[in-house]
Image (cartoon, rainbow, N blue to C red):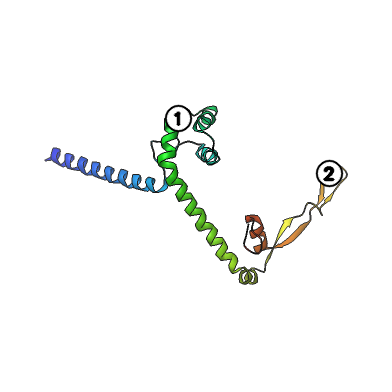
Amino acid sequence: MTESHDKFLRDIKKLTDMLEKSRIKSMNKKKGYEPKCKICNSAFQDEIDDMHDNFYTLTDLQEYLEDRGEKVSLMSLSRHYKKHYPIRKEYKDEKKKMEDEAVKEAIKVYPRLKKILQGTTEEFDPENSVYDENGNLKQLKFKKLPVIDKFLNKEGYCLTGYK
């Protein structure tokens, strides 16, 4: 009885593991990530993806990775850019598009937001601060900025909502 009970528990564990692997695999496919792919697991994936987008050859990418201590084959790079990268790129592009649309939508209501966010924030002003003859800071000066303007400027947007 104990032996059959142990076998039953092992079988349930195997099924649970298989379901978990299947769940992870389906999640990975949606985002263009394959756990066994050297490129997907590379610490330099974002850099080489940018290089690939700028028309660097696979050989250039291979040399770039080898210079940084990662040995990959041209076949690995080719497989990654044919199978995994398009899915990942589509996912990232869609995510970026949604973020941009959210910012644009927020900017559309900018006048109302500005009325709500009339507060100001102080930011260090190096041009008007006082320095001694050696260039050492003697007195700090700050300038006041509207909270919303500081946010929009930091994100690179002008008042019309365009970058």
Q: Residue furthest right?
A: 133
Residue with the mark numbered 2: 135
Q: Quadrant of residue 160?
A: bottom right
Q: CA distance from mark 1 to mark 2?
A: 54 Å
Q: Is residue 119 above or below residue 86?
A: below
* Front residue (pair 124, 109): 109
Can I make out residue 112 in this image?
yes
Residue 132 relative to residue 61: left or right: right
Residue 129 relative to residue 83: left or right: right
Q: Position of residue 146 (x, y in %)?
A: 69, 64
Q: Position of residue 138 (x, y in %)?
A: 83, 49
Residue type, mark 1 in image: Leu
Q: Residues within 10 Å of mark 1 (few under 14, many from 20)?
A: few
Residue type, mark 2 in image: Gly
Considering the numbered disc 2 on the image, is that residue within a helix, a strand or a loop?
A: loop
Q: Residue at x 67, y 69 (%)?
A: 118
Residue with the mark numbered 1: 74
Q: Quadrant of residue 40?
A: top left
* Mark 1 vs 2: CB contact within 8 A: no
Q: Position of residue 1 (x, y in %)?
A: 11, 40
Can I make out residue 38 in this image?
no
Q: Quadrant of residue 9?
A: top left
Q: Residue at x 44, y 42 (%)?
A: 85
Q: Residues within 10 Å of mark 2 (few under 14, many from 20)?
A: few
Q: Is residue 72 above or below residue 98?
A: above
Considering the numbered disc 1 on the image, is that residue within a helix, a strand or a loop?
A: helix
